[in-house]
Amino acid sequence: MRILSLAGRRLAASIPTLVLILIGVFLLLQFAPGDTVDAMMAQMGGGDAATAKELRKFYGLDLSIPAQLGNYLWRLVRLDLGFSSIYGKPVASVILERLPPTILLMTASLSFAFFFGLVFGVIAARGVNRWPDTLISTLGLIFYATPSFWFGLMAIVVFSVYLQWLPPGGFEDIGTVRTGIWRALDIASHLVLPTLTLGLIFLAIYLRIMRASMLEVLNLDYVRTARAKGLDETRVVTRHVLRNALLPMVTLIGLQAGTMLGGSVVVESVFSLPGLGRLAYESVVQRDLNTLLGIVFVSALLVITVNFVVDLIYARLDPRITAEG
Amino acid sequence: MDLTRLEINRRTALLTSAAIAANVINPMRAFAQETPRKGGVFNVHYGAEQRQLNPSIQASTGVYIISGKIQENLVDLDATGQPVGVLAESWEASPDGKTVTFKLRKGITWHDRKPFTSADVEFTAMNMWKKILNYGSTLQLFLTAVETPDAQTAIFKYERPMPLNLLLRALPDLGYVSAKHLYESGDIRQNPTNLAPVGTGPFKFVKYERGQYVIADRNENYWRPNAPYLDRIVWRVITDRSAAAAQMEAGELHYSPFSGLTLSDLARLSKDKRFIVSTKGNEGNARTNTLEFNFRRKELSDIRVRRAIAHAINVPFFIENFLGDFAKLGTGPIPSTSTDFYPGPNTPQYPYDKAKAAALLNEAGFKPGTGGTRFTLRLLPAPWGEDISLWSTFIQQSLGEIGIPVEIVRNDGGGFLKQVYDEHAFDLATGWHQYRNDPAVSTTVWYRSGQPKGAPWTNQWGWEDKNVDKTIDDAATEVDPAKRKALYAQFVKEVNTELPVWMPIEQIFVTTITAKARNHSNTPRWGSTSWHDLWLSA
């Protein structure tokens, strides 16, 4: 019951935020010069004024801005995301098609960054100021400072062009039809490079946070007690330190779930993945307001969900949090 | 000129290596002896997805690159740039130019096995080309009816004379036919067939995964004997140009059309034996870089200022250092690739001459003020390509040197069109003018007055010239080809004198294709054509 009430309160708190975000994005896009018909003309390479007028009417752009916003919000209340002008079909189905690659990529990169960040963070903290720490910290800094498009392109050049180990892009092989486990393996092989590219940057952050929080916890009194009662160092770290040091890491996942959605535009473009990031980018360039707002809506839902899960994990890691909530 | 220079370089390279191997005399002969191989999958780089794929309602290379293989046009251009029949077998114009009769090929069927007839041509012409198709609606403005006395005859009736050479040069792009039985009910723009095209072409549409790929397979019932050779064509959606170059190198792509790679990757791959990088096969897709003047700025409405600006920019230097072999000095709105209309270079030109530019500005009364500044301008570059961005920076620096500081204002596609062609919120603008094989298709609209506000790529400069208007109108309905050519030569002379838009650089798209491809780049708009004879060597 406590979980349900926590969920209820979370949801209630996020609805006004969501509405504000949607209105903000809507207004922001009104400030950009040109509408979806201009963008369409740009893509077609020409068109006459009469056609443009007809198209504006078709897309409902001849209405005033408050009327357009009102229409949109009213549709949203009825859970209708509207019609995409670039894809010519309902926004909900456009987004649904693009969701699996994004979620796969996001989950894989976050898991990768979290797991290796944790391992390397622990190693660095245990050998603080000795060579493993210096090496890991330096590498982390390099990963963090390198732009992801460069990482991606270099990964393609090395692993796809020269070594030919992995496919250079796409979500799955088009040449042959695979099913079941073979299809899963094929998709996995396509996701290795994008996952590494997206994950490496986050890895750097996770390992630094992990290192810092490990160092902090290692100096606490109860750790000294644990050592004093004769536990070996491995048990001290795994049973006593890790659990408490994990809290900031979990917080970070919640914060970064949103960043990952946005940050994947570059990675999706470089690796030609049909994800939400590229869809969002195209919707902005094409001034496809419905699709863009739909993506914002879905992304916000994703972030809210992830943060809700994070709250649950908090409670599990540190019982005091639930007691207070 | 050096349109094929890169390829020649490659062949020279091949020859040299062959000479070292000392057993092949002429690589060209080796090509000639090969027998065409059936089969294979051809992978194509698809850079910018469109909203729909029907070329009867959207004239753009992003549509032709896919649907040009699935749907066919009445006529196309042959290797020498002359019209050749595709769905039409022959044609004839009446002496007054108001009637054009097309005889259609017999025994052609749509991919769904329904017969192709003159009714399809009539339906497409009246409902798509005349009403929806960009540039088609202008071309067919005076089309009143298409008569179909029998299934193989389509008679186009015009209110005003339609020059046959204009129609035949426009129809390769603006003459794709759609199936009447699939489009006659409902809104054409919303028809699901637009995203799953059905045609008469050598390849049948199979699947379109938005954001990923399009697949088309061989049409076993294609009307040309023994065609096509390929089993399948796959268009892969790759928006990142550098990633596309890497995919070419990894062997995942065979062909990147229409300058789809970055200038530096093009230069790099042109040295790689596995690829051919060339402008060949794109002569029908010529474009010029523009500099558009807004006459609402009083400084720019003075002809001396426009000429001074042109004189202040060292175009040959820019081409040599930034665009290399892929561009050449332009001489006006009709590019030199257009053999039927190019008036030669002897029209008014504005060679680089900084002293003359300064003198012209002084004469116009714009003397340098404090800090040497005469006046400032806002330049809006179009976001269509790397070259425009470089060109706009070059303009900025060149004009800065003669005392005209320029502020560059960048927009995305929709924003650029809105600000320049609708709101007129620019002083200078620069982008591409696409030349479509006849000046009446998409060139004269840049100069003819009376264009509705908001129509992109038209005269929105606030400039009007009765003489130029008359020349344009006369040429559009002149039936005699020689007189028409003379009228367009006069048109170029007039607009180069008045300079409402300056078009000093000519470019042709660059193709990157695997060296294994045969029968490629053999017509002026090859990327858009049906590829019925394309094959891949082992």
Image (spheres, grey):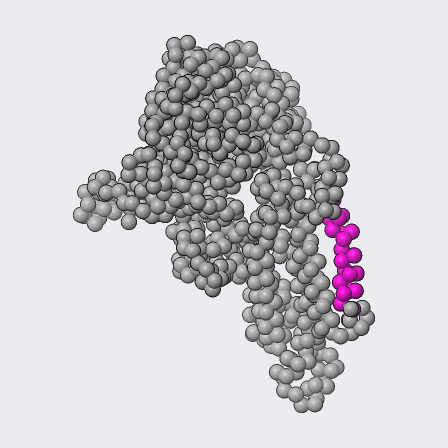
Which of the two residues, B499 or A98, is positioned nearer the viewer here? A98
Residue name at image x 36 percent, y 16 percent: B92
Specify whether B349 is left or right of B513: right
Where does the C terminus of chain A fall, quadrant-wise? bottom right
Residue positioned most to the right: A324
Is residue A10 found inside the magenta-colored segment of the image? yes
Answer yes or no: is residue A31 visible: yes
Residue B425 sits above or below residue A288 on the image: above
The quadrant holding residue B86 is: top left
Residue B13 sits above or below residue B353 on the image: below
Specify whether B241 is left or right of A164: right
The quadrant holding residue B284 is: top left
Residue name at image x 28 percent, y 40 percent: B11
Which of the two residues, A185 or A160, is positioned nearer the viewer here? A185
Answer yes or no: is residue A277 visible: no
Which span of residues is magenta-colored?
A2-23
Which of the two residues, B157 or B25, is positioned nearer the viewer here? B157
Residue A53 percent across, percent down from the top left: 63, 27
Residue name at image x 54 percent, y 51 percent: A274
Q: Main secondary structure of the magenta part?
A: helix
Residue B460 percent across, percent down from the top left: 60, 22
Is residue B278 found inside the magenta-colored segment of the image? no
Residue name at image x 59 percent, y 62 percent: A107
Where does the N terminus of chain A fall, quadrant-wise? bottom right
Residue B12 percent across, percent down from the top left: 28, 40
Which of the two residues, A220 or B130, is positioned nearer the viewer here? B130
Residue A246 percent across, percent down from the top left: 67, 72
- How many labels sit on residues? 0
